[in-house]
Amino acid sequence: ERRKELFMEGDRWFDLKRNGCPEFWIAKDGLKYETKQFMYTAPIPSRDIDLIPGMIQNEGYVK
């Protein structure tokens, strides 16, 4: 029922993030990929980090 109601709403990413999967997946080309834990958050733009004192970059991303 959820799939029918939220079809084409773009909620799949949030469902995967909430459930912590997929950690591993295989692409069409047959290569196995791993989703690192830090990839579940986006990097904070460097401009924001420069403008706001004390703000630090999300873990896994380089300033």
Image (cartoon, rainbow, N blue to C red):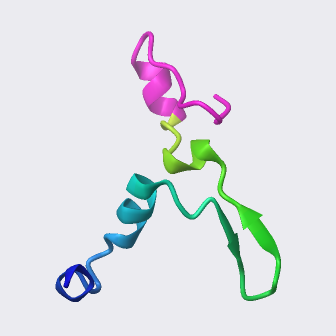
**Is 52 inside the magenta-drawn segment?**
yes
Q: Nearer the viewer, residue 9 or 57?
A: 9
Q: Which residue is at 38% across, 54% downward?
A: 18
Q: Which residue is at 53% across, 41% downward?
A: 43
**Is 14 inside the magenta-drawn segment?**
no
Determine whether 20 is above or below 15 in the image: above
Query: Main SS of the magenta segment?
Result: loop
Determine whether 31 is above or below 16 in the image: below
In the rendering, at what x and y percent does residue 53 appear?
Answer: 42, 11
In the rendering, at what x and y percent does residue 55 appear?
Answer: 45, 18
Determine whether 33 is above or below 28 in the image: above
Q: In which quarter of the view is residue 10 placed?
A: bottom left
Q: Is residue 49 left or right of residue 12?
A: right
Q: Is residue 3 left or right of residue 39?
A: left
Q: Which residue is at 38% across, 71% downward?
A: 12
Q: Which residue is at 31% across, 70% downward?
A: 11
Q: Quadrant of the C terminus?
A: top right
Q: Is residue 63 left or right of residue 16?
A: right
Q: Quadrant of the N terminus?
A: bottom left
Q: Is residue 2 left or right of residue 35?
A: left
In the rendering, at what x and y percent does residue 42 appear?
Answer: 49, 46
In the rendering, at what x and y percent does residue 16 appear?
Answer: 44, 63
Stretch of the chain drawn in magenta: 46-63
| Total number of numbered discs in the rendering | 0
Residue situated furthest top in the rendering? 54
Q: In which quarter of the view is residue 38 placed?
A: top right
